[in-house]
Image (cartoon, helix red, strand yellow):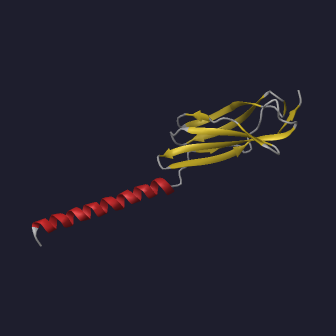
Amino acid sequence: MTKREKVLNHLAMIVIVFTLCLFGYIGYLLFYPFEPANFGDNPFPVEKKVIKQGEVVKYYVEYHKLMNVPARANHTLVNHVQINFSDIASFLPKGDYEVWNHDIAIPQFVSPGKYYIVITWTYRVNPLREIVMTSRTEEFEVVSK
């Protein structure tokens, strides 16, 4: 075996080991069970059980954020129809939080009845993966003004 063949064999082994390490790292990013946050009570309690059309709903959330990653929260008002609200971005650091969360204004056009809000949090834990967590509030009643 010549010196050139030995160098090529070593180079081939380095490339193979590097490729295996790269595939292992990509597998970790794609399949490791990341947990960005733990949420307390589910369904989340609401501040008022009866709300007039056009008023604001607040819900109470206790959660423990485990990772320093940004979150995107989407709220959906649910009855026999679903009404989506715009996303809200959050950049809170790791830690424990207890908050009366986001003021969600009930639209004037919704019909009276029982509703609840579904909250969908999307966390981008790495460049290849997003983790989606879903919770909801207690039911509340919307009445006419």
- At a point 59% along the width and 38% down the height, the residue shown is 72
In the drawing, does residue 126 fall left or right of residue 96?
A: left
Quadrant including the N terminus: bottom left
| Residue 109 point in image, percent of width and height | 82, 32
Tell me residue 132's x, y (percent).
60, 48
Percent coordinates x, y for residue 96 in the rendering: 59, 37
Residue drawn where x is 69% and y is 45% of the image? 135
Vertical placement of residue 25 versus 69, above or below: below
Q: Nearer the viewer, residue 110 or 100?
A: 110
Q: Which residue is most to the front?
A: 109
| Residue 81, position as x, y percentages in the image | 80, 44
The residue at 59%/43% (across/down) is 122
Horizontal placement of 16 versus 99: left or right? left
Going by the image, does 137 lie left or right of 71? right
Q: Is residue 28 above or below residue 125?
A: below
- Foreground residue, 86 or 98? 86
- Outermost residue, bottom direction? 1
Residue 24: image quadrant is: bottom left
User: In which quadrant of the rendered view does residue 114 lie?
Assistant: top right
Residue drawn 35% across the image and 62% down it: 20
Quarter that holds the C terminus: top right
Q: How many numbered marks are there? A: 0
Residue located farthest toward the left when viewing the structure as drawn: 2
